[in-house]
């Protein structure tokens, strides 16, 4: 069996392409660790929410960083984020936390603040890291970089199904507009925009299911 103890895989791409589900599957199959870097931005956002800082108050968000101690832990293959010693759990998964994560991720000081924790995890090896700038900024010398996306229409379709299954249906047009808007923000922001590294494999997975996408990337890894 091949040993993946040292490998570092960067999996970048816009929201809704299935990065986290697919990365988790790959990690499980190869016995490596899945690192969810979006959780770090969500946690910085959570600190602002819980301390009454508004999402557009850049100065207060920057000042809050000195009060934030972030730690990542991996327990039974699952990632936990500790904010000042307390597991954030699902508090980082609310729609408000998503909105704050998007706001704080535009601030260069926040990105710089989260650099070391991400690079330290990467340095250990045996990781697949999902995010927006893993291949361009965090580990530009990763053994494999994949930029995974799907057309906005395919992602909107998937998202609508997901929301309907959760009993929260939304009109397709609204979901699609949201995705296009978020893509533009991610791609056009000045600090670490979400763009493929020049040497990344670009993978558009419109016609691939979760399992097939995971197998395709595992093929690249092998
Ligand atoms: O992947 P996610 O939805 O959990 O990410 C939350 C937010 O953080 C999203 O707005 C994009 C941003 N993000 C980022 O800018 N860079 C990363 N490496 C990961 C996430």
Image (spheres, rainbow, N blue to C red):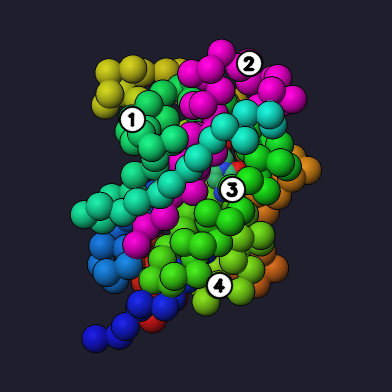
Residue ranking furthest to the top: 52
Q: Which mark is residue 142?
A: 4
| Dot 3 alpha-carbon crowd within 10 angstroms: few under 14, some 14 to 19, many 20 or more | some
Q: Tell me residue 45's x, y (percent).
A: 54, 29
- Does the magenta segment cover residue 41? yes
- Does the magenta segment cover residue 203? no
Q: Give the left or right position of residue 119, taking residue 221 as reference.
A: right
Judging depth in this view, the residue of 75 and 140 nearest the camera is 75
Depicted 118 relative to depicted 158: above or below: below
Residue at numbered disc 3: 114
Give the mark nearer the N terminus: 4 vs 1. 1
Judging depth in this view, the residue of 183 and 42 nearest the camera is 42
| Dot 4 alpha-carbon crowd within 10 angstroms: few under 14, some 14 to 19, many 20 or more | some
Q: Give the left or right position of residue 104, taking residue 210 as reference.
A: right
Q: Nearer the viewer, mark 2 or mark 4?
A: 2
Give the mark nearer the N terminus: 2 vs 3. 2
Task: Mark 4 and mark 1 in contact? Answer it, CB < 8 Å.
Answer: no
| Dot 2 alpha-carbon crowd within 10 angstroms: few under 14, some 14 to 19, many 20 or more | some
Residue at mark 2 to residue at mark 3: CA–CA distance: 20 Å
């Amino acid at each position: 069996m091949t040993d993946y103890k040292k490998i570092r895989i960067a999996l970048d791409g816009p929201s809704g392409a299935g990065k986290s589900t697919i990365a988790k599957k790959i990690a499980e199959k190869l016995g490596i660790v899945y690192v969810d870097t979006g959780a770090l931005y969500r946690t910085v956002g959570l600190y602002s929410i819980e301390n009454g800082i508004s999402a557009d108050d850049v100065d207060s968000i920057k000042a809050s960083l000195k009060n934030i101690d972030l730690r990542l832990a991996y327990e039974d293959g699952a990632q936990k984020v500790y904010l000042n010693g307390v597991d954030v759990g699902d508090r980082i998964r609310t729609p408000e936390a998503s909105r704050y994560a998007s706001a704080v991720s535009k601030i260069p000081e926040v990105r710089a603040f989260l650099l070391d924790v991400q690079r330290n995890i990467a340095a250990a090896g045996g990781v697949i890291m999902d995010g927006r700038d893993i291949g361009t900024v965090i580990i530009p010398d990763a053994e494999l970089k994949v930029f995974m996306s799907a057309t906005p229409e395919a992602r909107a379709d998937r998202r609508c199904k997901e929301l309907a299954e959760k009993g929260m249906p939304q009109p397709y047009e609204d979901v699609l507009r949201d995705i296009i808007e978020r893509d533009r923000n991610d791609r056009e922001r000045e600090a670490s925009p979400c763009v493929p590294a020049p040497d990344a494999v670009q993978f558009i997975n419109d016609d691939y299911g979760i399992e097939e996408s995971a197998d395709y990337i595992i093929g690249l890894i092998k």
